[in-house]
Amino acid sequence: MVLAGLFTPLIGGGFFGAKVATGAIGYLAATFLPVVTYGVVMASLHAMALERRFQSAAKGRRKFLRSAAIFTLVLAASAFAASTIVKTISAVTPSRVFRYRGQLPPEVTPNDQFYEVSKNIINPKVEAASWKLEVGGDVGSPFSLTYEELKALPWIEQYATLECISNLVGGDLISNALWRGVSLRVLLERAKLSPDAQRIAFHAADGYVDSFPLDIAMREQTMVAYMMNGDPLPDAHGFPARIIVPGLWGMENVKWLTRIEPVAATFRGYWQERGWADSATYNTMSRLDVPAPSAEVPLGVEVMVGGVAFAGDRSIQQVEFSADDGQSWSQAEVKKALGPYTWVLWTGSWTPDTPKLHVLKVRAVDGRGEPQIAQVQDSLPDGATGYHLILVDVMPPAEQPKAS
């Protein structure tokens, strides 16, 4: 427990797991369970050893078999608890552990590599056969849809990048996918909203709820998605259906969707009640993926620099990088985006001419001409800001061996 308390802040989880998606209480509970089960296992082994020493062979065998069964159950519980906390922490681990360290990420993130964050220690398992999506509340024509009925409706398909509001500067809680689903507007029009409706709430199978203004809900690109990169949504990403709302932080893209309804303008969702911002528009971000942090590069040799940049539904107009801690900037080449709601890949080249430790930085300008915010700010309450930087060590040529 002490080691967990000391280590978690170092990997970006905050003191006592305060920045972990499940919060401090969930984190401590998940940490405490493996510790307790470990103690029980050790106590059981000790008791088994003592009893086998002082009991008769026949009685000892019976006791051993009974204890072994208990030990197996406890060990299974311990393994499950350990797996749970590893999944919980890995879901929020920031930029210190990259899947593609020193490489550009794939433009479309494979489903099994798409970042995952939820409020849960254990996510819900929803069965398509019994699932229904209810559209109700203060509407003229409430209705519900089965999974098959939802898929039978006219669909739209689009690339969209999601980013967690708790993502740190340079963090990896951001991914891009191709989504297919039904425009939310189609469902809301069918339900016949009242003229004074201002906000739409989305309820999930795990008790999570969030909402956003009606004008955003009525945009054609806001969808109830049921496919991700050509496959049904994985359980971890909201099967059978989830909200995809380009331009708003990941917390607004509700997973395991079960109910849609209009709510009062003052309605606040799960994370808003816990101090996170209600204005959920993405901040412009940019990240250095190449070279890797602390890389050693040769003096006088051209080095590739690259990464990703993202500004929600505002697109990216320009990316610049610096190799001298922001004293001068070079324009990067920006690859054409897959769509209006996705990140972009950017690259550049740099030939170091001084053998020393260099500070590389990156910044971006969104499609409206607004520059990325330079001021450093933590992710709470409305998303982290600041320029991502890495240190790169430029190494001088190796000394030539002296002639003998």
Image (spheres, rainbow, N blue to C red):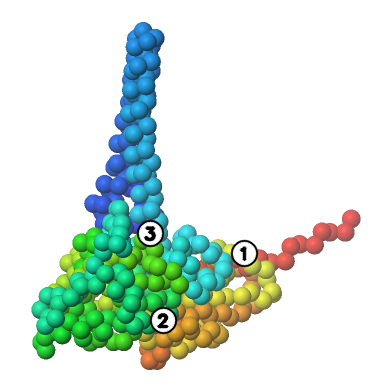
Secondary structure, mark 2, is: strand
Image depth: mark 2 or mark 1 in front: 2
Q: In the picture, residue 193 is in which quadrant? A: bottom left
Mark 2 or mark 1: whose residue is earlier in sequence: 2
- Camera-nearest residue between 88 and 239: 239
Secondary structure, mark 3, is: loop
**Number of numbered discs on residues:** 3
Mark 2 or mark 3: whose residue is earlier in sequence: 3
Residue 226 position in % (x across, y down): 35, 72
State the residue lying farthest toward the right: 404
Q: Mark 2 highlights which residue?
A: 158
Q: Mark 3 highlights which residue?
A: 91
Residue 322 position in % (x across, y down): 52, 79
- Camera-nearest residue between 44 and 316: 44
Q: Mark 1 highlights which residue?
A: 296
Q: Distance between the residues labelled 2 and 1?
A: 40 Å
Q: What residue is shown at x 33% (from left), y 39% (from top)? A: 77
Mark 1 or mark 3: whose residue is earlier in sequence: 3
Q: How far apart are marks 2 and 3 (CA)?
A: 25 Å
